[in-house]
Amino acid sequence: MILHELISFDILRLIWWVLLGVLLIGFALTDGFDMGVGALLPFVAKSDTERRMVINTVGPVWEGNQVWFILGGGAIFAAWPPLYAVSFSGFYLAMWVVLAALIVRPVAFKYRSKRESTSWRSAWDWALFAGGFVPALIFGVAVGNVLQGVPFHLTPDLHSIYEGGVAGKFFGLLNPFALLTGIVSVGMLVMHGSAWLSLKSEGVIVERARTYGAYGATVAGLGFVIAGVWLAFGIDGYSFVNAVDPAGPSNPLLSEVSKGGSWLNAYNDRPWIMVAPIMGLTGVLLTIRGLRAGHEVSTLLTSKMAILGMISSVGLTMFPFILPSSSDPKSSLTVWDASSSHMTLFIMLVVTLIFMPLILAYTAWVYKVLWGKVTEKDVIEHGDSLY
């Protein structure tokens, strides 16, 4: 038996669907609080010293946290090449805006405190705000559009064709439901950032962060519920017309897909997935309670629980669809027909099993070494060595 045949093609596809979710959730759990802190910066810090305290709560870890974003993009490219090709070409301008914001953010970290000028530092503070707020919003908008279906179709040679020009593709993303999911995303990461500040900062910064964090959590929770109701009654889901071979060739055009019904029918077929939205809403409520009670570690953990539940809800509700097509349902990409080859997925799995534990161990060690609060005294005494 050939080594890669030890694991069947369908199981490998399922494993890589789970791993993709793990990487994207890992990005939200780590770099998510970085973006949340950036979005909170103008509101929780009033003086220059306070702003430097806020910035330095994420200063030692933000670069490492972005590794999860790179890993997620790499996993899509290698494990799900049709998804990479279709999504990046359709969301091109949106991706450019996200990358521009993520590029401005490290520049702001590095240059913000190089000069004493108030206007100089204020400009970079707003750059840090944009670097947190803009990606959070657009990632949420992208999720909303995926749930509605994206207007593309595949040619017989699997070339993707989108409706509208570049600008139309971007502004077409900003529809009411997608904006709602964008707001949920921003609220969720503001909640997460405030939980991080509650743990890593002190004084009036913590008080303000807890107040804004409770607002963000409330917005995220209510928006999540409204989006669920909207999905149930206002947005068509997708389903296979005929049984599909989970180990079949990676050609979406060989599947028969229809648009109609509700995404929430998935909860009738797989009742156990209800655990995800329950986890999300429970995490939001516990985070609000923790912020108001002044808890620190437990609040960060319940914030992570909320993010895990909310993001998992989307993936589990859509399964096995990854990127449905609103203009040609037959072109929709699914777990069973949009992956790399059997051999490629197996080799990637072996590499992942070797290096992922090393990444997790190193990340845990870094957080242990850098544990502790950033105080006003730290910023004043070590001003030349901190951001």
Image (cartoon, grey):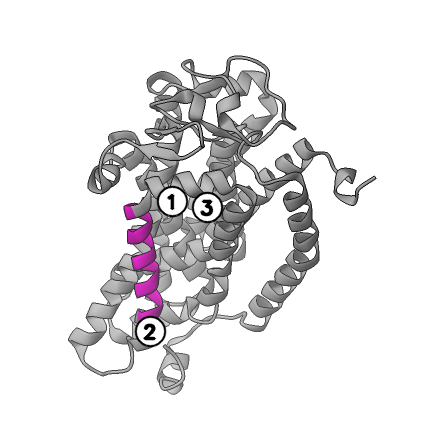
For label 2, the SS is helix
Residue type at mark 2: give it. Answer: Arg
The magenta segment: 93-107
Asked if residue 276 can be seen in this view, the reply is yes
| Distance CA(mark 3)–CA(mark 2) | 25 Å
Q: CA distance from mark 1 to mark 3?
A: 34 Å
Q: Which mark is residue 88?
A: 1
Callouts 1 and 2 close, C-beta under 8 Å = no
Q: Earlier in the sequence, mark 1 or mark 2?
A: 2
Q: Earlier in the sequence, mark 1 or mark 3?
A: 1
Q: Is residue 53 above or below residue 342?
A: below
Please identify the quarter of the rendering in which residue 367 is found: bottom right
- The amino acid marked with disc number 1 is Phe
Image disc number at residue 52: 2
Q: Nearer the viewer, mark 3 or mark 2?
A: 2
Residue 286 visible from this viewpoint: no
